Amino acid sequence: MTYPSSFRCKVLSVRKKEGLTIAQAAARFCVGIASVTRWVKNPNPKQTRNKPATKIDMIALARDVQAFPDAYQAERARRLGVSEKGIGHALRRMNISYKKNTAASQSGRRQTAHLPGDD
């Protein structure tokens, strides 16, 4: 959770008005020194975090989902050389959900991939 702009401005104005160091201002308002240092550079909070996938090739993952729609995330992770959790996050970014196969029996039911737009 981020601190609101009003609080950030208050910390910076008190720091400037009373001539406090960054460490003193951080201690007075019970925030981290790194936070106050960042606020000196830019007091406005960031609205979004635009961090692209760094290791997973999204095109290769899409091909893998089309080639192996019933594969588990662990199998995809081994094929692509990444972690299972990374595969899960990437599938969520691609809006790929897993639906149960209602035609299969209860004991033999597996999950199949549903690619958005492929109906």
Image (cartoon, rainbow, N blue to C red):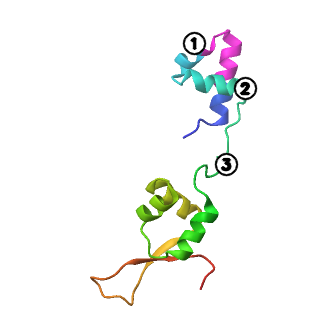
Q: Main secondary structure of the magenta part?
A: helix
Q: In this rendering, is residue 114 above or below 82?
A: below
Dot 2 falls on a residue whose secondary structure is: helix
Q: Is residue 96 above or below residue 8?
A: below
Residue drawn at point x = 67 percent, y = 45 percent: 47
Q: Which residue is mark 3?
A: 50
How crowded pointer 1 is (Cα within 10 Å; few <14, some 14-19, many 20+) is rated as: few
Element under disc 3 = loop
Q: Give how far apart the Cα atoms at labels 3 and 2 are.
A: 20 Å
Task: Look at the numbered discs 2 and 1 and tell me whether their residues touch, using CB distance below 8 Å.
Answer: no
**Discs 1/3, front:** 3
- Sequence-wise first label, 1 or 3: 1
Q: Which residue is mark 1?
A: 24
Q: Amino acid at mark 3?
A: Asn
Residue 41: image tag: 2
Q: Looking at the image, is 25 positioned above or below residue 64?
A: above
Asked if labels 3 and 1 touch by Cβ distance under 8 angstroms, the answer is: no
Residue bounds of the magenta highlight? 11-22
Q: How far from the left and from the top, in percent, is residue 17? A: 70, 13
